Image (tube, rainbow, N blue to C red):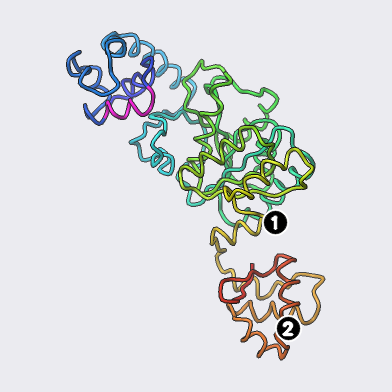
Amino acid sequence: MSLLHQIALTLIPNVGHVLAKSLLAEFGTAEAVFRADKKQLLNIDGIGEVIAGHILGNNAVQLATLQLESLRKANIEALFYTDDRYPQRLKNCYDSPVILYYRGTADLNHPKIVSIVGTRMATPYGLSICKQLAEVLQPYDVLIVSGLAYGIDVAAHKESLRCGIPTVGVLGHGLDRLYPSAHRHTANEMLGKGGLLTEFPLSTAADKENFPKRNRIIAGLADVTIVVQAALKGGALITAEIANSYNRDVFAFPGRITDEFSQGCNFLIKTNRAGLLNHAKDLVYYMGWELQNKKQGLQTQIPLGLSGTEASILSLLGQGSLRIDELALRTDLAQSKLAVQLLNLEIKGVIVCLPGSVYQLA
């Protein structure tokens, strides 16, 4: 298939991604679309005289020729939505881009992908959550995605890089520029430890209307979207709403009811649009992610500052999950007293309670 014509398909005025896919479904290839005659084109729903004229004209192909030459010079990949390297999670979304432009080393089909979004006006509370997320997720072999914007986005990227986690920034403009330019150093570091991704061709400016489109890619790339801090209006809530529409998991960190940039998170949780995270470890639990040789490692590593009883409980759970009645027998504690100890360990984040009062190491 011709990459030239695939790019040209996205450069036809008034032809969006959904209509482009309809054309491909009808004619089989992008090249065949440009070989079609006017009568064939007008038989396609959504194609009228004006769009047919744009397709029959040679302008889109001419623009694509220039675009392809520039992409090759800049070592930028063009990923068509039928390519193996195209992110399959995103491909399953009805409005996924026909083409993505990519520079980087990360696998966009990584086994575990987490999107982290939030306000541009991040507070120390939000920044501390980004740090915690990166540190907790580091052993779980994840890819972290965000939008390289001010605030939570760039904090998520920076913390990922600090912890050696690959991270991809989704941009609202072409890859021949960077907005905001203040994040160029971070972006350059990401090219070797993640990447930069966009649906917009070269020479596309960072126009305001591009960023809601960018948000659907952030949501569609990932298994789960996490909202760290957000006001009631803004891109983070849009991304969460899109992730919900894609039937993806969404979680949010709550905040004080008087904090402007926690109101969005609290709203998502209150309206069941997002699950509540009190700690980054909660995400690992909800997603069911496990470390290799987890039991062996945790059996020998008892956290500091625990009582003797708490340490005994952890030692037992290091051998496998146990019901509360089994724990009571093995610790020789009344269930009422054991329940208090278990609650303390849950609060400390070292164990989790499963349905049926079954406990296991976090």
Q: Is residue 52 positioned above or below 226 on the image?
A: above
Answer whether residue 21 is magenta in the image: yes
For the image shown, how many numbered marks are present on the structure? Answer: 2
Q: Residue 41: which quarter of the image?
A: top left
Q: Is residue 362 positioned above or below 55 on the image?
A: below
Q: What is the number of the mark on residue 336?
A: 2
Q: Residue at x 25, y 27 (%)?
A: 29
Apparent side of residue 243 relative to residue 17 in the rendered image (left or right): right
Apparent side of residue 262 relative to residue 290 in the rendered image (left or right): right
Q: Residue at x 24, y 21 (%)?
A: 33
Q: Earlier in the sequence, mark 2 or mark 1?
A: 1
SS class, disc 2: helix
Q: How far is the residue under mark 2 from the one under mark 1? A: 25 Å
Image location (x, y in percent) of residue 83: 35, 36
Q: Nearer the viewer, residue 275 or 300?
A: 275
Q: Residue 235: which quarter of the image?
A: top right
Q: Which residue is mark 1?
A: 278
Q: Is residue 258 positioned above or below 74 on the image?
A: below
- The kind of residue tagged 1 is Asn
Q: Which residues are magenta?
A: 16-24
Q: Nearer the viewer, residue 204 or 138?
A: 204
Crowding near pointer 1: few (<14 within 10 Å), some, many (20+)? Answer: some
Q: Quadrant of the C terminus?
A: bottom right
Image location (x, y in percent) of residue 317: 64, 78
